[in-house]
Every structure is written in structure tokens, then in C-alpha cells.
Amino acid sequence: MEDLSSRERTILDRLVNCFIDTGEPVGSRTLSKRGVDLSAATVRNSMSDLEEKGYLFQPHTSAGRVPTDKGYRVFVDTLMHQKQVSEDDRRRLTAMVEDCIRENEVESLIGQVSKIIAEVSHQLGVALTPRFQKGMFRSLEMVQLSESKLLLILTIQSGLVKTMVMEVDASIGASDLDTTRRIINERLAGLSIEEMLSEVEERLMSSSEGSPKLLRMICDKADSLFEVIHEEDLHLVGTGNFFMQPEFADQQLRMAELIGMFEERTEMAGILSSRMASDGVAITIGEENESPQLKDCSLLTSKYRFGNVTGVIGMMGPTRMAYDKMVPLLRYIASLTETLLEEKIEKR
């Protein structure tokens, strides 16, 4: 930014906005008609300087210019004026997220939030459910279904509930069942799911109370009981929005690479997971993305937190994106999701 004059910053700002609006290379005459109080010749000279400095490029000799990744980065970081989410949109989004939270368990909710993002942004909605292994154990309830079956109900403080039916080879009396449940809840209190997996046997099998057989079965079944909690679930919603963008027209190879990446999922999950430490809205543009498949894309993400676990939601589209609208929109949805999740958890 230090190498840009005030005039060049103004021209870059207007050019990026114009290109985002139209998708067409922007010429000097167009800019001079869009509120740049300079002659077309002066604008043309400044555009040439911006091109030399790496902020613009000219796709064809006779065409206007378009922003480079470097040009977008300066625009996003220092030039753009973020648009406020309107009151109507706030009400609509609040109603949509409230409906999701009311109708879904926490573990399936985030997929619905990514669907909302795709719907309102017309981009690809992305989300990664929280790392529940960092969640803190709340309770384990045991319900006798029959003489040989127990229903286990695991709850962690972030709101996730996991159930599992366990076969037992002998009936367990109500008193033993109650004592065993108490021992489990006392001895696992304050542990994260991750800690429980490594310490469950030591903590439970050293007890002189409860049913040794049932405690042994809980230890042996720990991996299965916590299986869903271990998995980070990736959600990608709105691929139609993504591939209908004009930037991907006539780019079958690029589309095939992206589809392959989306279907394979591991790399995309890793990319989102690495952004859990970022505050605010994290934006990577074009070549800033480590994955070569994303070199023509921008990825906007925001972490969300509830309880003591963290996940990521966001959107992905071409680098020609209305950042001034998308950034505040994503920030609002992330904040709204956090707030409403906390309210849901507090009511449990």
C-alpha cells in the first residue's frame, strides 16, 4: 500500500467495485464515468502504473483491466467499505437460524447453517463441525431397556448428545446400575473427551464400588461411544451456486479438479480446520490459498464457539466476489449462530 498514491488508491477502489459488479474488464472511460473526477487519459496512465506495480492486469491488449490477487488484497484490507446487514436481512437470518436450532440437534445444526450461507450468499457454503474431543464431559446416563440391554446417553457441555445401546451378558440390579452411574460421573467429571479416552480405564477400574463387569464394558466400548464425537464433519452446500459463476464457464478441467477435491473431502476439511485459530473473518484470495485447486477462488471463514469447542463456517466463490457484502454477512451469521446455540444449551 505504501507505493500507492491517493489517486491510485481511488482508481483501484473504483475499478475493483466496477469489476465485481460487471465481471468485465474495466477501461479508463468506464471509470471516468463512474465518479472518478479525472480525465480518461489521467485514469489510463494511473491504471498503467497500477499494472506495473502488480495490482491490475490486462487480459487482452485491447481490453480494460481487472484486479490481481494483490489488488483484491489491498481492496479487502484497506479500501472497501463494508455494507451493513440490513434490518430485514437480520430478521430473516435470525428466523432461519432459529428454525434450524429449534428443529435440529447440535451435531446436525451446522450443516443447516452452511445451507443458509449458500442460500443468502449465492456462493458455496462450507462448515466444519466442532472438535468435540475438546468438549468437557457432562454426564453419562444408563437406562435398562431389557434384562440384557442398556441404553447409554453421553452428554458433553457443548450440547452434543450421543446414545448407544450396549448388550450385557447378565442382568444388573438397579442398585448396582445406579452406583456404577454415580462412579462414572464422579470420576470422569472435568475431563475433556480426549482425556477421557486416555484415562477412562485407569479412573474407572480402580474403583471399589459399582459393577466391575459394567465398568469393564464401558472401558472396552469407550472408542465406540465417543466415535461420532471424534469425527470432524465437513459440509459443502451450494455447489450449483459455485459452478454457475461465469468464471468457471468453459473451464471443465478446473471444475473437475474442484469437484474431485470436494468429493475427497480430507484436504478441504484440513484447510478449514487450520483456520480455527483465526479471529474475525479470515480471507484467502486466489494464489494465497495453499491448494492449487483453489488458485481462482476466495475462501472466507469465521470460527464459531459454543461451550469450550470451536468450529468453522464460511463461503467460497471466485475471486470476483462482493467482499463488502459477504464479510459482514458471514460475521453476522457466525455471531448469531454462537448466540442462539448458547441459548439452546442453557435451556437443556
Image: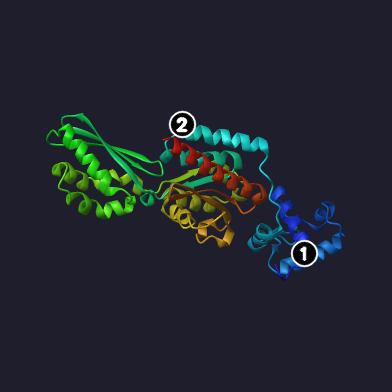
Asked if residue 254 lies left or right of residue 195, the reply is right
Q: Position of residue 321 (x, y in %)?
A: 64, 50
Q: Name the kind of residue labelled 2 in the image.
A: Glu
Whether residue 44 can be seen here? yes
User: Residue placed at 20% from the left, 47% from the top?
Assistant: 220
Quadrant containing the C terminus is top left
Q: Which residue lies furthest to the top in this view?
A: 146
Quadrant containing the N terminus is bottom right
User: Residue placed at 44% from the left, 52% from the top?
Assistant: 269
> 120 and 226: which one is in front?
226
Above or below for 287 versus 145 = below
Above or below for 91 versus 83 = above
Q: Where is residue 281 in the image (x, y as percent from the top left)?
A: 57, 53
Of callouts 2 and 1, the N-terminal one: 1
| Circle 1 crowding by C-alpha within 10 Å: few under 14, some 14–19, many from 20 | some
Q: Mark 1 points at which residue?
A: 8
Q: Is mark 2 on a helix, strand or loop?
A: helix
| Circle 2 crowding by C-alpha within 10 Å: few under 14, some 14–19, many from 20 | few
- Location of residue 228 by image quarter: top left
What is the number of callouts on the image? 2
Whether residue 167 can be seen here? no
Q: Name the kind of residue labelled 1 in the image.
A: Glu
Q: Where is residue 287 in the image (x, y as percent from the top left)?
A: 57, 62
Asked if residue 34 lies left or right of residue 125, the reply is right
Residue 237 disc label: none
User: Residue placed at 19% from the left, 36% from the top?
Assistant: 177
> 147 and 22: which one is in front?
147
Q: Which is more foreground, mark 2 or mark 1?
A: 2
Q: Name the residue under label 2.
A: 103
Q: What element carries label 1?
A: helix
What is the distance, in whole Å, between disc 2 and disc 1 at their CAs?
51 Å
